[in-house]
Image (cartoon, helix red, strand yellow):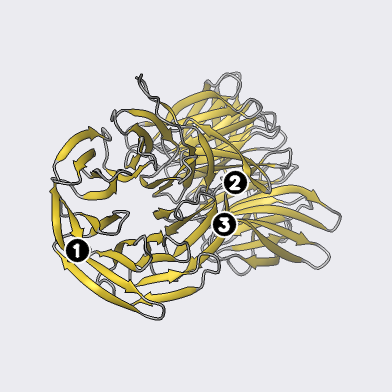
Amino acid sequence: MATEALPLEGVIGFGGHVRDGLLLHPDGCTLIYPLGSTIVIREKGNPTSQEFLQGHSDKVSCMGLSRSGRYLASGQITYMGFCADIIIWDLETRTLRHRMSLHKVKVQALAFSFDDRFLASIGGQDDNSLVVWDAESGRAICGSPTSNESVLCVKFLNTTNTKIVTAGSRNMDVWEFDLANRKVRPHGCHLGQLKRVVETIVIDDEDHYAYCGTSTGDLLQVGLENKLFQNIGPKTKIPRGIVTSAISPFGHVVVGAGDGTIGVMDKKSLHMMTSIKLPSGISSLVMCNEITSKSFTFLVGTAHSSMYYVRYDTSTNTLHAELEQTNHCEKINDIAFPQGYSQVFATASGSEIRIWHATEYRELLRIKVPTLQCTCIAFMADGKSIISGWSDGKIRAFGPQSGKQLYVINDAHQQGVTAIIGTYNCKRIISGGKEGLVRIWRIGATSTSMEASMKEHKGPVNALELRKNDSECVSASSDGSCIIWDLTRFTRNNSLFASTFFKTILYHPDESQLVTTGTDRKITYWDAYDGQAIRIVDGSDSAELNALAVSPDGTSIVSGGGDKDVKLWGYDEGHCYYVGRGHSGAVTKVKISPDMKFIVSGGEEGAIFIWEYLTPPIDV
């Protein structure tokens, strides 16, 4: 039986690392942005109205929107020696219109002509060529190698489709596009003694000047008719360079910098009129349609995957920033649902724990412990606390509504806590450490104490699982063993061995079997009584498996791993029925909601994908 696509219901995330990846449709209310290999289209201010464009095989590296809003172009990264795809999407029908492939390894930048007829693309550093495409037919018209140094940005002029500007590391050219002879001819811009790496270009509405933001934090004004350098500003350079720029409705140049600075500059003198600083570097900047006689607004995307609305008030010459959306920007280390409740779930990433509303895709609570890594989380069965393991070896418990720290177990594990679980009677916590110890902690009303420390593993403990009656727990380790522990005598009852780094272990809901997965790419079923392997299923053809979840009714398994796919299997048949594709990094965690309505997966790129749960078809 062939595998089908797993329907994607929603995403929590934004690819903030993609330069100018945040786009606003000309209708003024539709946001478009990348997340891994998926492109998200959603209503401004409404995170739940999401649509998805899926066609890329790897991370989206750049995007371009046509002026009319009819076409969207997106480019991707691929492996060394392979060609990277450019896809032109029809936004009216939300369908893939053309897939074009010429550039090697990476597509660096894309730009449409003002009349939507042509698309210009630049290849990455392994390719470094300019290609002009016919947007209607998807065919390449002409191309040319660019400078010896890397080219980073490309723009068509605003009033003609026969001139293209490219710039990059110590180069800037205006190209004449000759459609009749299918040629592009470069004309170098004279910048005098200046040597700059241009990271962003914006062209004024009349096509008189190009404003080039550089990695050294200054803005160059270059005349497009005489191709001569005109001016440079501001006097004080902006730290970490100007990364993105736009022309405001009032003619100012708005710039975003790598240190989080947003500035409004006078386009003649290049004097900095006003600025504001956000917590992380700016990666995208796009003007909104909300314009009054005294103000204008624009959307900003940051490298830490947040979005802001910023309003510039001309009467007071000030900028006001308002947070619109925030997401994880680092690898998702763990995902947890409360016992029997599907409306919320928690994620651990970097130094943060966040609690999300599962259907509205919004953040309800954020807990942050700076400079540390939260490696694992779990809800206690009564729902009164979130327990978490940290890289400093401490176990911290927080209130799930207030985020207040309830208690800390100091020095729980010497080299960091790697796995954690709470007992069903809520009186004990079991933790696993990087050094291979499994420890049991008694949780009292006012104090915590260690009941037992069990050392048999020789590698990090990656997962822990409990029986429902709290009599036994099982630990999975990178040393190639899983050990079943007696929680009354604190000794080993049984053990399972395989030549793999075990990543996950789970009980089947009736507790007669255990299911494991790891670096050997196999999903293995074990007898929970005698520890013998019953069945081995190939979970992936190409990469290790990191995550596993068994449905509450025991009919299906969901797996995720280094091949970036989320797979749904029939438990009894061991057959993969559905595959969800969208992550651009390895899938690190998967969880099935307690009501079996959806699946949540987290990836190495920091994206959270929410998939519809489909029951495997039952063979009659």
- What separation in Å lies between label 3 and label 2 (alpha carbons)? 20 Å
Q: Is residue 278 above or below residue 466?
A: below
What is the x, y in percent for residue 442? 31, 73
In the image, 161 versus 21, the foreground residue is: 21
Front position among marks 3 and 2: 3
Q: Which residue is mark 1?
A: 436
Q: Which circle's residue, 2 or 1, is located before the other in the chain? A: 2
What is the x, y in percent for residue 614? 45, 32
Q: Which residue is mark 3?
A: 363
Residue 314, picture quadrant: bottom right
In the picture, measured across the screen, residue 126 lies left or right of residue 226, that is: left
The residue carrying pointer 1 sits among few (fewer than 14), some (14 to 19) or many (20 or more) residues within 10 Å by Cα, namely: many
Q: Which circle's residue, 3 or 2, is located before the other in the chain? A: 2
In the picture, measured across the screen, residue 309 lies left or right of residue 145, that is: right
Front position among marks 2 and 1: 1
In the image, 294 versus 474, the foreground residue is: 474
Where does the C terminus fall, quadrant-wise?
top left
Single out the residue that lies furthest toward the right: 293
Q: Kindly identify the amino acid type of the residue bearing the numbered disc 2.
A: Leu
Q: Is residue 243 above or below residue 87?
A: below
Where does the N terminus fall, quadrant-wise?
top left
- What separation in Å lies between label 2 and label 1 (alpha carbons)? 44 Å
Q: Which residue is mark 2?
A: 22
The residue carrying pointer 2 sits among few (fewer than 14), some (14 to 19) or many (20 or more) residues within 10 Å by Cα, namely: many
Task: Residue at 29% x, 28% y: name it.
Answer: 573
Q: Kindly identify the amino acid type of the residue bearing the numbered disc 3.
A: Glu
Q: Kindly identify the amino acid type of the residue bearing the numbered disc 1.
A: Gly
In the image, 336 versus 4, the foreground residue is: 336
Task: Residue at 13% x, 42% y: name it.
Answer: 532
Q: Is residue 475 above or below residue 395?
A: above
Q: Quick check: can you spot residue 109?
A: no
